[in-house]
Image: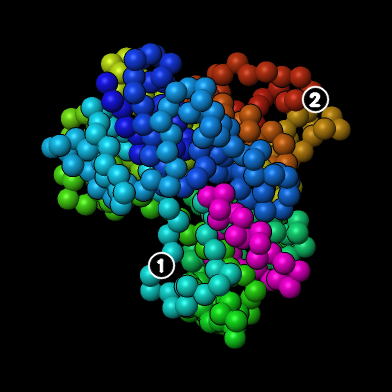
Amino acid sequence: MDYVIIGGDAAGMSAAMQIVRNDKGANVTVLESGNYYSYAQCGLPYLLSGVVEDEEQLVARDVQTFREKHGIDARVEHTVTSIDTKKKTVSGDHFTVPYDKLLIATGARPIVPSDWGGGSLGRIHTLKTIPDAQQIMENLTDEVKHVTIVGGGYIGLEVAENLVLLNKKVTIINRSELLGAGFEKQMSTLIEDEAKKHGVELLLGEEVTSFEGDQDGNVAKVKTNRQSLDTDLVLVAVGVTPNTNFLQGSGLHLSDRKAIKVNAYLETNIPDIYAAGDCATQYHRLKQKDDFLPLGTHANKQGRLAGLNMIGLARPFQGVVGTAIMQFFDLTLARTGLNTAEATDLGFPCAVSETETSTSAAYHPNAERLHCLLVYHGDNEQVLGGQFIGKTGVDKRVDVLATALYFYVTMEEIENLDLSYAPPYNSVWDPLQQTARRR
């Protein structure tokens, strides 16, 4: 059986490893457009500042390991440009490869709006790959004093923190009035305060319209709908879009976000073709419909299951609840499930309960303040989502809630959870339970 995988990162190589481990006679070919396999994209902001000292630390397995240890025909610089679903082949500029079963795991690419004038100037960057990070680091010379980040989501905030560590002056321009993707206004305000505390300038509710360059062809100004801003380097971090343009005319069904539609077994609408990761849809358990949430955790899970399903070891993907966490200077920011806007869009009558409480017994010297917010159904009190911001204890609460959301719990059931307590670690009532009780 000939298995072909397009894409050599999280989803693609998770699938490849399941195939070679469970089908000793499998012929696995992976076609990767770049030169790196299985690397941690989420670590790239920390490479810029030197918190991660070397790019090789981000590579889980290099291409030679896949070839020599696992017997995978792992190719680099092989960009697939078309799929012939009748002949069952994939092709690029200099190759055609036949398949019995095919996995599309091409990931996503950063969005750079085409109506921005001057977008091709030097020192305007996106950050998605190791080569992207290398180019940014090459340009972060001493003469670069000011960096403008377009976008106030996860990547924008993480890069801002790491550039401040390099003593760069940072400005974030965000089209939304709220900083931090998906956070409620009262939580976003805490993120704003943290940014300002560390000297980050915020231009919220502004839209970039164009860029102007200097005599060397590098960006020198960012123009918005309100003002013109001098800058030395720009990072664009306004979101990603699936790498599915090459599928035009293939007959594969795409979502309105251009992600490949898949069922629970990661199968597309065409037999023997599967898709996984940032180029595919993910079923959202709370929305009860397909969504597009490109995260490394989802890509690894979907890829692993796609590989098993391709060799007949059927395992369904159980869906996501939308959990995310990040560090931003001295704070940890996390959310899971739905926010009020998402719940309202789905027609849910939603309510909110909030607390600012202590991460441990208030009298203990380890105690820190923790902001908690729960969104719940106004009729049946099913918990729909939650957000947490604080210096410590955020990861514990968001993961407990993510687990609870998976099983569709109510606010009362949150109160009834048997959670751990000792003065250095918690209050008698966990902050999550305190928030549920305040409704």
Residue placed under numbered mark 1 in the picture? 113
Residue 358 locus on image (x, y percent): 73, 35
Task: Give yes or no for residue 137 being in the magenta stretch.
Answer: yes
Relative to 406, is 287 on the left or the right? left
Outermost residue on the right side: it is: 365
Residue 398 locus on image (x, y percent): 57, 33
Outermost residue on the bottom side: it is: 215
Q: Is residue 389 at all visible to an observer of this figure?
A: no
From the viewer's side, name the closer residue of 199 and 317.
317
How is this picture coloured?
A: rainbow
Find the magenta span and give its range.
129-152
The three-letter code of the residue at mark 2 reads Pro
Residue 296 locus on image (x, y percent): 49, 37
Quadrant of the rendered structure where residue 87 is?
Answer: top left
Residue 377 locus on image (x, y percent): 40, 36
From the viewer's side, name the closer residue of 323 and 438.
323
- Residue at image x 43%, y 34%? 74
Q: Earlier in the sequence, mark 2 or mark 1?
A: 1
Residue placed under numbered mark 2 in the picture? 424
- Residue at image x 60%, y 81%? 216
Q: Distance between the residues labelled 2 and 1?
A: 49 Å
Q: Is residue 233 at all visible to an observer of this figure?
A: yes
Per the rendering, the mark at residue 127 is none
